[in-house]
């Protein structure tokens, strides 16, 4: 089995209110993207390569090659494949899968697994990666998620004052990594393009193909850093996460 990771880092992180993409913001003197990259580079799973989808030069001028060369060892750099992402998350995933298709043989594609992860989620454990890999081997796709603890209401566009309360027991919040057999995510992206189907996560793409994915409850640490407040929370989480990894 060949195992690859895709790290999505093409967003600009405008909601943080800062002048640089959120993946370059530091948590305790280390950039978020480096902490997320470590999840795969230091895993006991032997990842063949980590494909990093970075912002288009027209969106953010930055020398990503120099950045990684300054911050990683030679063995780690050899695992990286830096590509240009798209204007949307789905486009970045599509670019990454097309790149992956260009470097693996048709025979390898039959037995290849792809982890797709948000670079703004630096707190995923190696135990979770192994669980995802095991579930993907059985079901073809798997993803991390969390239980919904707040009451969720669905607003009706035709009547902004009208709401429908959704049953919390039936809801989960999708997180990443989301993991797929290569041929499944490739077909899902192709169908989405043909259907003009736009999604904010990758599991929805395989659902649109008629497939299912196994869900795994993630730790409470697996937050997505989106706002300035999230950065402060991440600083508080860091030591706890390090202790969790060492257990």
Image (cartoon, rainbow, N blue to C red):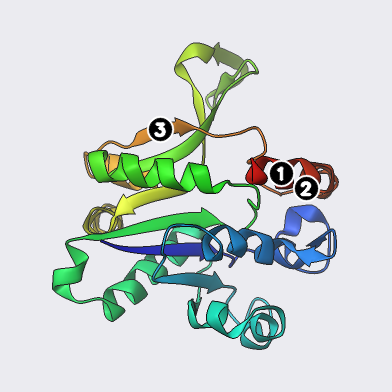
Kindly identify which numbered label has been placed on residue 215.
Answer: 3
The front one of 97 and 105 is 105
Q: Position of residue 160 (x, y in %)?
A: 62, 23
Report the side of 181 relative to 40 (left or right): left
Label 3's element?
strand
Q: Earlier in the sequence, mark 3 or mark 2?
A: 3
Badge 1 crowding class, 10 Å Cα cut-off, few under 14, some 14 to 19, many 20 or more, is some
CA–CA distance in space, label 1 to label 2? 5 Å
Label 1's element?
helix
| Residue underneath mark 1 | 241
| Residue underneath mark 2 | 238
Give yes or no for contact between labels 1 and 2 (Cβ–Cβ under 8 Å).
Answer: yes
The front one of 71 and 242 is 242
Would residue 174 be seen by someone viewing this image from the given angle? yes
Q: Quadrant of residue 230?
A: top right
Tag count? 3
Label 2's element?
helix
94, above or below 155, in the image: below
CA–CA distance in space, label 3 to label 2? 25 Å
Q: Quadrant of residue 105?
A: bottom left
Report the side of 125 relative to 81 (left or right): right
User: Which quadrant holds the C terminus?
Assistant: top right
Would residue 199 be seen by someone viewing this image from the given angle? no
């Amino acid at each position: 089995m060949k195992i690859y990771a895709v790290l999505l880092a093409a967003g600009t992180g405008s909601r943080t209110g800062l002048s640089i993409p959120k993946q370059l913001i530091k948590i305790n003197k280390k950039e978020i993207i480096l902490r997320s990259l470590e999840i795969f580079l230091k895993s006991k799973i032997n990842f063949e390569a980590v494909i990093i989808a970075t912002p288009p030069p027209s969106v953010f001028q930055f020398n990503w090659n120099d950045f990684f060369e300054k911050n990683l060892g030679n063995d780690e750099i050899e695992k990286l494949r830096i590509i240009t992402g798209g204007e949307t998350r789905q486009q970045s995933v599509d670019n990454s899968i097309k790149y992956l298709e260009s470097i693996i043989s048709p025979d390898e594609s039959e037995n290849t697994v792809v982890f797709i992860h948000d670079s703004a989620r630096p707190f995923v454990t190696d135990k979770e990666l192994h669980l995802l890999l095991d579930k993907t081997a059985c079901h073809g796709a798997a993803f991390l998620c969390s239980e919904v603890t707040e009451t969720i209401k669905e607003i009706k566009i035709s009547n902004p004052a009208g709401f429908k309360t959704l049953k919390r027991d039936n809801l989960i919040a999708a997180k990443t990594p989301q993991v797929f057999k290569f041929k499944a995510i490739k077909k899902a992206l192709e169908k989405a393009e043909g259907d003009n189907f736009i999604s904010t996560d990758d599991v929805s793409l395989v659902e649109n193909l008629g497939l299912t994915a196994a869900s795994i409850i993630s730790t409470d640490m697996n937050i997505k850093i989106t706002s300035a407040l999230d950065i402060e929370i991440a600083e508080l989480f860091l030591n706890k996460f390090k202790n969790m990894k060492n257990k």
